[in-house]
Amino acid sequence: MAKRNYSREEVNSILGRAIQRENDGELSHEDLLATAREIGISEQAIERAAIEVAAEHRRRSELVDMRRDQWRGFIAHLIPYVMVNALLVMINALTTRFPWALFPALGWGIGLASHLWAVLFPPRQHQEYHLEQLRALESRGTRTSARVFDEPSSIDHHERVASQDDEQTDPTSGESDEARRRSNGS
């Protein structure tokens, strides 16, 4: 049999199909290391590659989550636009013949169009910046919603507001829940 060489893409494709047929597409880490040893690849190379693949997968997942959040933000902008402008058109039709409702629709529509443009064609550095913010929020354990804050100062402000909301005051006595608990011995 003639010696044949394979390209990297062919090797990936052949090994991927063979593993999929042999093991239903699943391979344990130990099996992966054993296979690598058999074909002369060091365990360190496999470990580095596995870490890189996991990082790429995590980054893609973060990007998908961020894009989903961006679309949700756009939809949250679109719904009030449609509702308010429908109401304004109805009021305009009932009150006067001059189409004044077009002015707010066009003005707000410019903002809506720019929001759509930012969702459809986000600048690469903008995406990276927001992904870094998401990672920072998640590493501190403070990400409570899908919202990403644009400025670090707004993150600190949000945390201060959240901590102030936790300690609510009684409007009649002006005493906080925490102070009331301490005085009652709870």
Image (spheres, rainbow, N blue to C red):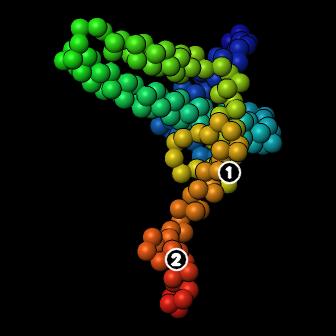
Label 1 – label 2 distance at C-alpha: 25 Å
Q: Which amino acid lies under the numbered mark 1 shown in the image of this protein?
A: Asp
Q: Earlier in the sequence, mark 1 or mark 2?
A: 1
Q: x, y percentage for residue 91? A: 24, 21
118, 56: nearer the viewer: 118
Question: Which residue corresponds to the image point at 58% horizontal and 16% vertical from the top-left?
Answer: 121
Q: Residues within 10 Å of mark 2 (few under 14, many from 20)?
A: few
Q: x, y percentage for residue 143? A: 58, 50
Q: Which residue is mark 2?
A: 175
4, 42: nearer the viewer: 42
Question: Which residue corresponds to the image point at 67% horizontal and 26% vertical from the top-left?
Answer: 126
> Marks 1 and 2: which is nearer the front?
2
Q: x, y percentage for residue 3? A: 73, 12
Question: Which residue corresponds to the image point at 70% horizontal and 32% vertical from the top-left?
Answer: 129
Q: Secondary structure at mark 1?
A: helix
Q: Which amino acid lies under the numbered mark 2 shown in the image of this protein?
A: Glu
Q: Is residue 180 left or right of residue 122?
A: left
